Image (spheres, grey):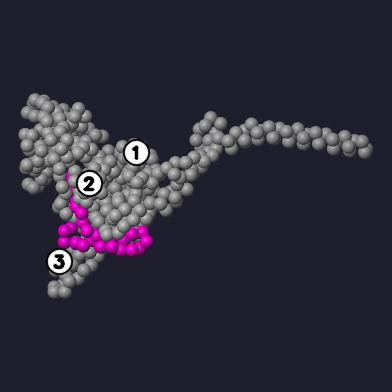
Amino acid sequence: MIGTKYRSAFILFVIALVGGFFGAYIFINYGQRWIRLSGQNNIGGNTVTVIQDDNNKVLKVTEDSIAIDLVKSASPSVVSITIKKDISTRPQILDPFYLSPFDQFFGNQIPAQPAPKSTTPNIQKVGGGSGFIISADGYILTNRHVISDTEATYSVTLSDGKEYEAKVIGTDLFNDVGALKIEVKNLPVLKIGDSDNLQVGQTVIAIGNALAQFSNTVTKGVISGIGRSVTAGGNGTSENLEGVIQTDAAINRGNSGGPLLNLAGEVVGINTAVSLEGQLIGFAIPINSVKSIINGIITEGQIVRPYLGVRYVLITPAIAEKNNLPVTSGALISRGDTKDEVAILPGSPADKAGLTENDIIISVNDKNISADLTLSKIISGLNPGDTITLRVSSKGQTRDISVKLERYQATK
């Protein structure tokens, strides 16, 4: 009996030993390989956990650490803008958000009510927006529609709660961009990214003064579309936004002018509008289209850009068929809906070069104009003084026209 017991114990020991070796073999050849292939990568200065299988296929990327670090780093460079106005002798806006050309997007349809007569100034907050710091000495980029009221005053609140009076440097006639200046030194600056490299599905983060009362609100989403063309409008005016970024990162009233960031913490867009017809459909101006403006603000303290001086409609195959046009892509020079929206700006480079209404600009310097490469996008990447060659279809004939771009200085 005793021998049998020892024999049974020995057999169990052997089985356990073999099982242990087998388990170790599995761990060494599979578990250890899993650990070796899984690890941490550095993306944009952030540590990201990456889990891969034996074939190096990425199974999971933990992005939470990126978002947290990114927000901590970027938030001090994002500001809240407050709009104030004397409403004692003007209609009193009941809606807490200042009515702008983009109110159709944001649903500001509450009518104005007559204000009581008064000789005493009544300075009130009538709206707000967002912006971000582009230079350590206090230059701030935002949307034109946030700071377009010449009768209003503006202040900027930093992420630490300190508020400063702001001076309007200028607004851009050709893009929904404006600039402010506050007298503060050594401010944190956001890094400017490359919007041409964006991919649909790419993760982005928006930071801004949501609803003009929740400063430094963070929302996260993806790039939903690239190269969109939309018309934002209301109150009798409209604005064509061309080649904009579409995102499902929630953008609310007050977010206008704030940055859209990639996971490296770089600005890839300027948040500008959201559609109420759908859910989580927001739009941002690609940062590459305003890089020359940013450079002018930093170096000259004003908004300066090259300009051609035409108003146009981007041709699509449907537009070409409907209007019996000779080409299916390009920029059709056309006046706007009102008498003030002329097709050719008098005295502009286009006017001097002899361009006329209904001419079609097919290409610029042999770059064909399309939905992905619009006329505005091409011009924005050039400089005042550059001479360009336009291929133009005019009255059934195609010819090349040389045009020297001039310096456009935005008004305050």
Between the C-alphas of marks 2 and 1, the distance is 25 Å
Contact (CB < 8 A) between labels 2 and 1? no
Residue 347, position as x, y percentages in the image:
6, 42
Q: Is residue 393 covered in magenta?
A: no
Q: How many labels, in total?
A: 3
Circle number at residue 198: 1
Q: Earlier in the sequence, mark 2 or mark 1?
A: 1
Question: For mark 3, does the 10 Å Cα neighbourhood hold few (<14), some (14 to 19), or many (20 or more) residues?
Answer: some
In this view, 114 is above or below 224: below
Between the C-alphas of marks 2 and 3, the distance is 36 Å
Between the C-alphas of marks 1 and 3, the distance is 45 Å
- Magenta region: 149-175
Q: Residue at x 19, y 43 (%)?
A: 305
Compare residues 264 and 122 and report the one nearer the observer.
264
Q: Is residue 52 left or right of residue 170?
A: right
Q: Amino acid at mark 3?
A: Arg
Residue 353, position as x, y percentages in the image:
8, 34
Pointer 3 residue: 90
Q: Amino acid at mark 2?
A: Gly
In this view, 57 is above or below 305: above
Mark 1 or 3, which is nearer the eye?
Answer: 1
Q: Residue at x 27, y 59 (%)?
A: 183
Q: Amino acid at mark 1?
A: Leu
Label 3's element? loop
Pointer 2 residue: 296
